[in-house]
Image (cartoon, rainbow, N blue to C red):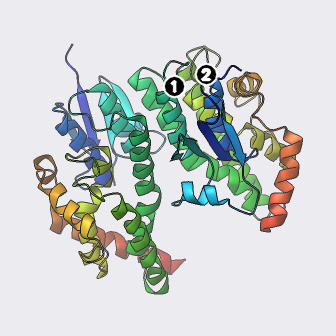
Amino acid sequence: MADVVKVFRTWSSPFALRVIWALQLKGVEYETIFEDITNKSPLLLQYNPTYKQVPVLVHNGKPILESLVILEYIEETWKENPLLPEDPYERATTRFWAKFGDDKLVPSVRGVLMTQGKEQEEGIPVVIETLKLIEEQLKGKKFFGGETIGFLDIALGWTANLMCVFEEVTGIKFLDAETFPLLSAWIENFSDVSVIKQNWPPRDKLVLKFQAAREKCLAEAATK
Amino acid sequence: MAATTTSSDVKLIGGWPSPFVMRPRIALNIKSVGYEFLQEQLGSKSELLLKSNPVHKKIPVLIHGDRPICESLVIVQYIDAVWASGPSILPSDPYDCATARFWAAYIDDKWFPSLSGIAKAQGEEAQKAALDQVVEGLVLLEDAFVKCSKGKAFFGGDTIGYLDIALGCYLGWIRVTENMNNRKLLDEAKTPNLVTWADKFCSDGSVKDVMPETDKLAEFAKVLMAKFRAPPPN
């Protein structure tokens, strides 16, 4: 029986992109269902009642949720082009930094993107310090995965596209080449991989989206 | 429990009250791996901890040979992979594995913050709301239990697995919270399967010796709150 694979995503979700990249890197055929986050489909709500969010991977009718969980599932199900290292210690290190990216980098960036004034000012060093820790992981490597992209490149890949969008929206420079030579080189190399390049959402649309999101967030904060 | 690895090879930096530390301890017990337990003192962090986990400076840290592994669930997966000849902790089926990982992440990212929210809630109404939220989460986990266990004793089936460890480590603190707030969080009416599971989990050979006694934990909770000047429980 042929595999039936569907991905529920939005045009902009960086978490959904992780799933797309992994499936394409492994040569898995899938159908895409684009969701409108302001008008979620009954099917999405049925597959993900806990969080009601994208991405959702549906494999032969069974839903898998949460992008990093989906990545592990994809890795275990389709063995071509392994994304995780074989060695258990290196796997543990990869998983540690993927979790770090989601638990620390994402909120710290959001903390600057969605604030202004003193609150925003205080958030900037947090982003820089977090990025410095990630920069160190690239020492002696072209990609986090080594010579080719792997699990951690996919997990952190959103930074290669979105950090410059956030810099444009906030007018704040996070990733300058002098402070972050390794990350800057990685962004170029990562973005050059064809599976990555062909899936980037349009940058101007992303700028508009995050500008609107920032304005909405600041307006809501002002009314509290 | 017969050790199949010399305990000098494996060290665990942790503390007896921490649910996160309990996770690798249970995993090591499941695999019959001996280890040296290096206990941290409340309020101070050892040089070894700071050196082994410079990013978070938190327990648990597993040191295998001389290599540190951090983050409790990452450590559990590492233990499962390294001592592969022992009983499996993660489900072998990728879908069951994804389900276990999903609920473990839910427990840490959504449910545990609601549990710790109880101590921080100010006033009766806020406390009741906080307690209600914890129970709602447990009801979701009750449903997950029914689906994952497929009629068996544990989330993992016949034996304790990843999701059992992920939730079970909190049972001591759940009991302390129930006593302090005079309210059942795991109860027969809403979460009957989890009530049965909790007893089986706590009496399991790999858990018994590492699950702290509720009284001892309650005393520790008082010390913790006094030390960090959190608002007292109702």
Chain under numbered label 2? B
Mark 1 vs mark 2: give the one in front: 2
- Picture layout, residue B49 above or below residue B206: below
Q: Are marks 1 and 2 on the same chain?
A: yes
State the residue in front, A15 or A210. Answer: A15
User: Is A188 on the left-hand or right-hand side of A54?
Assistant: left
Residue beneath disc 1? B83
Q: Is residue A166 visible?
A: yes
**Residue at left offset 21%, top offset 33%:** A81
Q: Which residue is mark 2?
A: B4
x and y, in percent, of residue B217 in the image: 83, 45
Viewer-closest of B62 and A189: B62
Q: Is residue B51 left or right of residue A153?
A: right
The answer to whether the residues at label 1 and label 2 have Cβ atoms under 8 Å apart is yes
For badge 2, the amino acid type reads Thr
Quadrant of image for the C terminus of chain A:
bottom right
Numbered badge on residue B181:
none
Q: Is residue B234 something that shows in the picture?
A: no
- Name the residue furthest bottom: A117
User: Which x, y percent locates residue B91?
Assistant: 48, 23
Q: Secondary structure at mark 2?
A: loop
- At x 54%, y 47%, the residue is B71
Residue occupying image coordinates x 24% and y 53%: A143
Amino acid type of the residue tagged 1 in the rendering: Trp
Give the SS element for disc 1: loop
